[in-house]
């Protein structure tokens, strides 16, 4: 999220307007702040949300998206991402996608992440979206279903068509939400494309891994 926000170059007031268009209670919940890792300054998205214990179905979430103030294109991308998540969870739990009850994914933070990412992506409107291979690690993660190995089962279900590489650490590095968004946004995988860089950003996650950076580089520009 921090990378897309830096590419879009929005003020706090503009971010608040976009969040309020998704759900009024999201207004003022996200700020882009500086974070230093190994003495190198980058950016991170800091989110402060009220607690929510509601579990939502895919239909519930699609209703939230359809009733939001997002553009039609952003609504479609967000709906596509949530649908992919529901299908992955359905396979993992041997259910119909319509019967899946989202826990973490149904919470306000994931609605914020997916809907705001969809809005920012359509605002930037890249002709080509290139992503380096995703770093995958070993280890485990604790979630609503208990302790699970990583990559988590829903991540495994979404990995087809995704390029990956080894991450020199242990723990969750890629979430189902992230992969669902990459699929919805039509990402292609590879090295740096030939381009004229117009904007760039170094962004960090909230967790620090020993001997491995938890960050990403974003660049936006025109083809050369």
Image: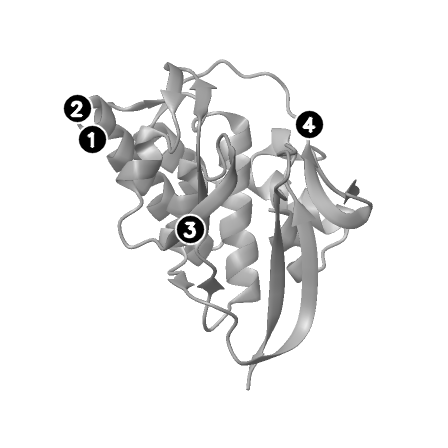
Q: CA distance from mark 4 to mark 2?
A: 34 Å
| Residue contact at pointers 1 and 3, CB within 8 angstroms | no
Q: CA distance from mark 1 to mark 3?
A: 24 Å
Q: Is residue 9 left or right of residue 72?
A: right
What SS does tag 3 mark?
A: strand
| Residue contact at pointers 3 and 2, CB within 8 angstroms | no
Residue linked to disc 2:
94
- Callout in the foreground (3, 2): 3
Mark 1 or 3 closer to N-term? Answer: 1
Q: CA distance from mark 3 to mark 2?
A: 29 Å
What SS does tag 1 mark?
A: helix
Categorize mark 4 by other alpha carbons within 10 Å: few (<14), some (14-19), many (20+): few
Q: Is residue 119 left or right of residue 105?
A: right
Residue 187 image point, x, y percent: 40, 60
Q: CA distance from mark 2 to mark 1?
A: 5 Å
Q: CA distance from mark 4 to mark 1?
A: 32 Å
Q: Number of labelled discs?
A: 4
Residue linked to disc 3:
165
- Callout in the foreground (1, 3): 3
Residue linked to disc 1:
91
Closer-to-camera residue (30/17):
30
Closer-to-camera residue (22/58):
58
What SS does tag 2 mark?
A: loop
Residue 146 image point, x, y percent: 39, 13
Q: Is residue 118 left or right of residue 60?
A: right
Closer-to-camera residue (178/140):
140
User: Compared with residue 102, is residue 172 higher up or lower down, i.e. above or below?
Assistant: below
Residue linked to disc 4:
48
Q: Residue at x 50, y 60 (%)?
A: 122
Categorize mark 2 by other alpha carbons within 10 Å: few (<14), some (14-19), many (20+): few
């Amino acid at each position: 999220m921090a990378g897309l926000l830096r590419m879009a170059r929005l003020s706090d007031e503009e971010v608040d307007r976009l969040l309020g268009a998704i759900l009024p209670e999201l207004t003022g919940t996200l700020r882009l702040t500086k974070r230093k890792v190994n003495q190198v300054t980058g950016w991170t998205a800091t989110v402060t949300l009220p607690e929510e214990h509601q579990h939502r179905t895919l239909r519930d979430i699609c209703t939230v998206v359809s009733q939001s103030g997002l553009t039609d294109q952003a609504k479609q991308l967000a709906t596509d991402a949530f649908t992919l998540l529901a299908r992955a969870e359905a396979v993992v739990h041997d259910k119909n996608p319509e019967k899946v009850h989202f826990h973490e994914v149904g919470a306000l933070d994931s609605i914020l992440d997916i809907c705001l990412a969809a809005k920012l992506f359509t605002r930037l409107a890249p002709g080509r979206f290139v992503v380096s291979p995703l770093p995958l690690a070993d280890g485990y993660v604790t979630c609503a279903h208990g302790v699970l190995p990583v990559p988590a089962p829903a991540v495994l279900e979404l990995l087809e068509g995704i390029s990956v590489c080894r991450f020199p650490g242990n723990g969750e590095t890629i979430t189902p939400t992230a992969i669902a968004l990459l699929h919805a946004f039509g990402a292609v995988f590879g090295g740096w494309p030939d381009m004229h860089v117009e904007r760039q950003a170094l962004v960090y996650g909230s967790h620090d891994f020993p001997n491995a950076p938890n960050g990403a580089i974003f660049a936006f520009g025109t083809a050369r």
